[in-house]
Amino acid sequence: MKIMLSAGEVSGDLHGASIAAAIHELSPETELIGFGGKQMQAAGVRLNADMADYSVMGVWEVILNLRRIMRLLNHLTNVMKEERPDLLVLIDYPDFNWRLAKRAKELGIPVFSYIPPSAWAWRKGRAKSCAALADEFAAIFPFETKVYEDAGANISFVGNPLVDKVRPSMSDEEAKAYFGIKADEYPVLLMPGSRRQEIELLFPAMLEAAKRIKEVKKDTVFYLPVAQSMAQEDMEKMAEKAGVDIRFTHDHTYDLMAQAEFSLATSGTVVLEAALMGLPCIVLYRLSPVSYFFGKLLVHVRFFSLPNILLGEEIQPELLQDEVNPERILKEARRFWEESSYAEGVRKKLREACDRLGPPNAAKRVAERILAAAVRLGADKQTFGGSV
């Protein structure tokens, strides 16, 4: 049996790797191919294209890179024709993956959607069009299912795989020794995102805020966990120019999260990972002016960070666009050391939010559904051929 996976972002690569490992544990003979990153490759997926060459964010940025993205779409379509997978599994990355799903459907390949588009937040009509293309859906958040059920989709909430993955590997004493955190130091994490555009849009404001935090609270030390796709040398130069001393790290990030007091973090999966480790965040998000203009027209949500969405209230501060400035970040940061009960109150709410992510073993549950769908639907797939 052969299954094709498609993921185009760091978070999707993480989820794809968890799925791949679970599939191989349940069915070692299953061949996994597709589009993803280094984590999926390490988990046994034979990559037909590497996502590191194609990751962009924002409406305007996608338009600028449209020709390159179309070449990727055509390439993966040819892969499907040649490889004849029993099932195509889409992992998030909606703007690209649902174009690929349409190609798969035209070729008679069944489609399984893992982490479907956020129709609950914007463009609710997508749920109906997606339900017409995908044979089965699996959601990792409980609030995602209703809009798809209303559209007639076969969808289930399988829980979130981060519940299994995000945990410390060291004791507090070991972690402090490993990262060189002294008893009289106040560690703060900077997590500017892994994509070039996120770093360009958010890291300068983080650095200016860090500089002001250090002026006010002199025992602060800053750590920055470096993801595989991040350009550390560029960030080091930016930090040096801003006059901010940062300790860059490359492993045991969850152990580091457990030791930090709070984080300045770009909105995304990393904020949920931090929540699972009990790390409060000041959540930042900024898009290019064009992308933000379209976003305001299309997106209608109260919150944009996952812990806040899970509980339906502002557990921790969210700063958007012009709010991402050193003065506002410093104002939010001061609460962590000036208000004695604030940090613990945030941590308590984070635990409540994480309780809504479902029980452990989510990756195994979705792998079981994928394998069952590949057997059930793959046997009926149409004969390949024709042009797309």
Image: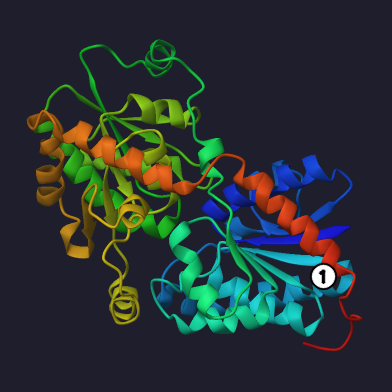
Q: Residues within 10 Å of mark 1 (few under 14, many from 20)?
A: some
Q: What residue is pinned by disc 1?
A: 377
Q: Nearer the viewer, residue 124 or 66?
A: 124
Relative placement, left or right, of 348 versus 228 is left
**Residue 210 appears in the picture as rendered:** yes
Quadrant into which the N terminus falls: bottom right
Q: Identify the residue at image location x=64%, y=71%.
A: 154
Kind of residue at disc 1: Leu
Q: Quadrant of residue 369?
A: bottom right
Taking the spot 42% from the left edge, 17% from the top edge, the residue there is 175
Q: Residue at x 44, y 50 (%)?
A: 269
How has the structure been colored for display? rainbow
Name which residue lies at 15% across and 40% down.
333
Image quarter of residue 288: bottom left
Q: Return the x and y of residue 71 as percentages of the image width and height.
A: 67, 76
Q: Is residue 289 left or right of residue 122?
A: left
Q: Examine the rendered structure and indicate whether residue 46 appears above or below residue 54.
A: above
